[in-house]
């Protein structure tokens, strides 16, 4: 049995001194597509931030892509993040450079040197998100949906073991949300593991999958009602 990509046992999640979530028991297996839902302020973002090392885990057990969150040191965080692909709501693209240069920046920052390999990787991830012809464009020349596709491509650069998507459709209209979701679904079908925080319940109905809910300082699995 392979080790889960993410496992939290009896974990408590804090934002500074305030307890956000307690007694968190979560397991995500390789290849799963998991939603994290809950109203604004129920702890979805704090949960995500704990996973990519923005908030320390101080209680309970937690391991993610072979890193122990309890003993995670500051210097290990960049290496942890290389094994994770993180997609944010607000894209976080560098506005002063084009799509390819945005991706190049990440590869260089994570130690890639071989120009041929770099070019090949950039083409490969842009192809996966249907943006292969837009590499020369600047973020301001792209729609919100296209920018989010580039952000997903960026998250795929280092072949992450787990993709954390924090409200990836939060700034997009319903039609564009569906398009971005199709991209994530396709990536998931290719074997990538995805944990996606969202409050877009229409997407859950359209693409049912394992769902965790944050509510009342707890995280629990909810069974989706099939209509």
Image (tube, rainbow, N blue to C red):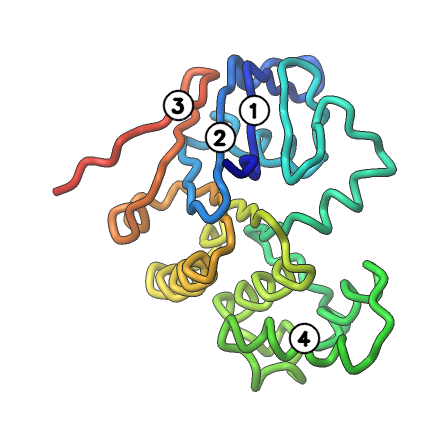
Dot label at residue 122: 4
- Which mark sits nearer the N-terminus, 2 or 1? 1
Q: Circles 2 and 4: CB distance less than 8 Å? A: no
Question: Given the current orientation, which residue lies at the most extreme front position?
Answer: 1
Give the crowd class for mark 3: few <14, some 14-19, many >=20 residues within 10 Å: some
Distance from the alpha carbon under mark 3 to that under mark 1? 12 Å
**Which of the two marks, 3 or 2, is nearer to us in this view?**
2
Q: Could you tell me which residue is drawn at 85 percent across and 62 percent down?
A: 111
How far from the left and from the top, in percent, is residue 150? Answer: 59, 68
Q: Could you tell me which residue is drawn at 24 percent across and 36 percent down?
A: 224
Q: Nearer the viewer, residue 97 or 85?
A: 85
> Badge 3 is on which residue?
220
- Which mark sits nearer the N-terminus, 3 or 4? 4
How far from the left and from the top, in percent, is residue 108? Answer: 83, 66
Tag 4 secondary structure? helix
How far from the left and from the top, in percent, is residue 139? Answer: 64, 72
Tag 2 secondary structure? strand
Dot label at residue 27: 2
Q: Circles 2 and 1: CB distance less than 8 Å? A: yes
């Amino acid at each position: 049995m392979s080790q889960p990509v993410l496992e939290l046992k009896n974990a408590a999640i804090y934002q500074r001194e305030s307890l956000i979530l307690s007694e968190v028991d979560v397991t995500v297996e390789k290849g799963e597509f998991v939603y994290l839902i809950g109203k604004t302020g129920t702890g979805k973002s704090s949960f995500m931030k704990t996973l990519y090392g923005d908030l320390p885990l101080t209680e309970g057990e937690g391991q993610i892509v072979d890193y122990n969150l309890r003993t995670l040191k500051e210097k290990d965080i960049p290496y942890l993040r290389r094994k994770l692909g993180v997609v944010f709501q607000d894209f976080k693209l560098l506005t002063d450079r084009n799509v390819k240069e945005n991706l190049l920046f990440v590869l260089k920052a994570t130690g890639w040197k071989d120009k041929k390999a770099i070019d090949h990787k950039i083409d490969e991830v842009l192809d996966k998100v249907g943006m292969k012809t837009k590499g020369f464009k600047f973020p301001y020349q792209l729609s919100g949906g296209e920018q989010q596709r580039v952000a997903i491509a960026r998250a795929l650069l280092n072949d992450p073991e787990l993709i954390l998507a924090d409200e990836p459709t939060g700034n997009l209209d319903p039609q564009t949300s569906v398009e971005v979701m199709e991209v994530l679904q396709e990536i998931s079908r290719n074997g990538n593991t995805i944990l996606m925080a969202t409050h877009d319940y229409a997407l859950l109905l359209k693409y049912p999958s394992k769902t965790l809910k944050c509510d009342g300082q707890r995280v629990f699995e909810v069974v989706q009602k099939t209509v």
